[in-house]
Structures are given as C-alpha cells and as structure tokens.
C-alpha cells in the first residue's frame, strides 16, 4: 500500500491534466473490477459487480498546481493558481514545467528574493514568478507558453517512522490508494456492487463528480478524501486519531443515516475515528448528493497536515483504518439511507 501511495503521489496530475495518474490508477485497480471506462470528462469509472444494490465511492485524482499566464521578455514566468494553495509555501519551491516534449524545472522567486533583500511585506502570488534561467525566446523554443502547466516538485518519503508519510498531492492520492486497496479486499465478495470513481477537477469546482454520476445510479455514495489536521495545539484529533467522518463542512451536510452507520462500524471494529464539523472546504460528496433528485452521501477522510500546501504529512494507520471502515460499510450497508 505504501508503494502505491508513493507512486501516485510522485505522479503529476494537476486539475485538467490527470491522464498520467489515471493510467497509474487503472493499472493498479484493473485486476479487481469487472469493468473500467473513462468518460468524456476524464473520470475513471470502475465497476465491481454484485448482487446488492449499487453504491458509489469517489476519490479525486487531481492535485493543486500552477498554469502559466504570462512570460515577460526576461523570461520571468508569471502564473495562475489551480486550486487553493497556501501561497507562503510557494517561494523557493522547485516546479516541474510540463510540455508536450519533456519536463523542465524552474524555481519560484520574487524581486526581493532575486536581489537577496528582505521584503517589507509578504509577496502575493501575482508578484512571484518562475525562474528557469532562460529567456522568453528560449522558453518558446521549448514549447513553454501561456497555458503550460507547472507542478510543485516534492518526492514522497516517510519521516520519523515508516508510518508517517510525506509528499505532494496526498490530497487526494490517499483517497485513490484507499479505493484501490478496498477493491483488492472485496474482489471475491459476490454480494457487493460498487462503483469506484476517480474524479477529475475536484480542486477547481468538483466538476468531475458532477458529471460522473450520470452514468451511475447508486443507492448511496461516499466521498473518500482528506481533511485538515486539527492537532496544532490539540492532542485528541488530527493525524494518528483515525479516519474523520464528516457531519458538516462549509457547503455540505452529510446524510445522518450514513454518519450513524459509519460511527457504528468504527465502534464495532474498535478503530479510532473523528467527527468533523468544519466551516471551510467541501468535497465531491456535495455535487453527488445534489444529483438525480438527491443521493444520500457521506464523507470518510484522512487527516493531513499542511493539506493545501506543496507537501503534506499523514499517518498510514489512519489510511489502514479508513479501509477497514469502508470495507465494513460496503459489506453490511444500511438498508435505507433516507434521513
């Protein structure tokens, strides 16, 4: 499982350019599902057939990143953000510049940093630029133009122990890894009927989940994602305290039947869990729940520190417990999820 997460984390898949990570996911999950297809939006929809009414589990493939919006005559590359990024993590960051031919590198900097001066205020991202050491003419020759994607460069690694994972795009390559591992565990269960959906462009507006649902008619659904770790000054939540079960986020109220069922499963399995009530952020569960006249939906998340930065930190035990929780949920689903 750690190797799968490492592979997916190291793969580039910014919103709107998820094809590389989609191919990796397909390679890993194909042996454990009956069908796998890519819809016109780019979502990967995998179906494990069974006797029970179908359910849907969704994890998004895309990651936050940058796209070039201007190159000045000195070769300074100015960019737009793709998804919500903590801007303070960008300065000094190495980026991969992805072209049709190759991948080039650059460093994010700004005027004061370029000159070795201390800025009088923290620069906004519009004042930052990527320095490749090349002129505008040289960049254009290498097919680096307005509209070219750039991805922060961070290699996956474990930190203080093998249980503590660190890398880019843990949001939501963790969710993708969970679904792959879950598909492996339930492959031979003839009762479970589940669609594993790996969505695109979640970071830009939950767009992939909005379109993927039209090919599926689940009795209920769950988004498998990550969430912020509330353990900066607390010791009873955050990484290492089990999967988070969403009650409410900034735009979504989870189906209470699913919340209760998830809590009951966690208690039965004697695994730690957290209840999340948040005023910021949302997940694919929002758009799924509003489709086809309304679909009962919930969220299972893994806590990640530095969640919307260029490098996150997570506990592998939370991932393992999220898989256990979801396995129990799909094996013994609630008979009705109407609140």
Image: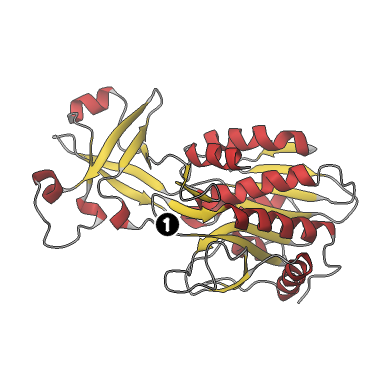
Q: Position of residue 333 (x, y in %)?
A: 82, 63
What residue is drawn where x is 19% and y is 39%?
76
What residue is drawn where x is 78% and y is 61%?
329
Whether residue 100 is situated above or below residue 285 in the rendered picture: above
| Quarter of the rendering occupied by the N terminus | top right
Q: How many marks?
A: 1
What residue is drawn where x is 34% and y is 34%?
97
Residue 293, by quadrant, is: bottom right
**What SS does tag 1 mark?**
loop
Q: Position of residue 61 (x, y in %)?
A: 56, 45
Judging depth in this view, the residue of 318 and 214 nearest the camera is: 318
Whether residue 296 is situated above or below residue 186 in the rendered picture: below
Q: Is residue 164 visible to us here?
A: yes
What residue is drawn where x is 42% and y is 54%?
83
Judging depth in this view, the residue of 264 and 203 nearest the camera is: 264
The chosen color scheme is secondary structure
> Would residue 190 appear left or right of 197 to someone viewing this image?
right
Whether residue 106 is situated above or below residue 300 in the rendered picture: above
Q: Position of residue 267 (x, y in %)?
A: 75, 70
> Would residue 200 appear left or right of 142 to someone viewing this image?
right
Q: Residue furthest front?
A: 161
Q: Is residue 198 visible to us here?
A: no
Q: Which residue is labeled 1 in the image? A: 308
| Quarter of the rendering occupied by the C terminus | bottom right
Q: Position of residue 191 (x, y in %)?
A: 89, 51
How crowded pointer 1 is (Cα within 10 Å; few <14, some 14-19, many 20+) is rated as many
Judging depth in this view, the residue of 205 and 320 nearest the camera is: 320
């Amino acid at each position: 499982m750690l190797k799968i997460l490492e592979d997916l984390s190291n793969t580039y898949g910014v919103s709107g350019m998820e094809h590389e990570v989609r191919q990796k996911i397909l390679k890993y999950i194909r042996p454990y599902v009956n069908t796998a297809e890519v819809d016109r939006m780019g979502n990967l929809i995998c179906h494990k057939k069974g006797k029970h009414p179908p359910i849907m589990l969704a994890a998004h493939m895309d990651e936050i990143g940058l796209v070039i919006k201007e190159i000045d005559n000195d070769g300074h590359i100015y960019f737009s953000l793709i998804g919500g990024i903590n801007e303070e993590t960008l300065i000094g960051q190495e980026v991969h510049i992805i072209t049709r031919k190759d991948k080039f590198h650059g460093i994010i900097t700004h005027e004061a940093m370029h000159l070795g001066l201390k800025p009088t205020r923290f620069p906004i991202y519009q004042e930052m630029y990527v320095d490749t050491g090349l002129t505008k003419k040289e960049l254009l020759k290498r097919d680096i133009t307005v509209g070219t994607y750039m991805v922060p460069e961070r290699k996956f690694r474990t930190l203080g122990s093998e249980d503590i994972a660190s890398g880019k795009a843990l949001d939501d390559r963790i969710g993708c890894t969970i679904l792959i591992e879950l598909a492996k565990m339930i492959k031979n269960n003839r009762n479970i009927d589940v669609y594993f959906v790996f969505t695109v462009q979640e970071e830009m507006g939950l767009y992939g989940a909005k379109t993927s649902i039209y090919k599926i008619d689940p009795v209920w659904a769950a988004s498998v994602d990550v969430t912020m770790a509330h353990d900066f000054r607390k010791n009873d939540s955050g990484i290492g305290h089990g999967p988070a079960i969403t009650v409410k986020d900034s735009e979504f109220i989870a189906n209470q039947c699913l919340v209760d069922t998830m809590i009951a499963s966690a208690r039965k399995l004697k695994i730690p869990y957290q209840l999340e009530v948040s005023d910021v952020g949302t997940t694919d569960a929002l758009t799924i729940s509003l489709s086809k006249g309304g679909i009962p939906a919930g969220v299972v998340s893994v806590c990640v520190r530095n969640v919307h930065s260029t490098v996150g930190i997570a506990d592998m035990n939370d991932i393992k417990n999220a898989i256990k929780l979801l396995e129990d949920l799909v094996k013994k689903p609630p008979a009705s999820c109407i609140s």
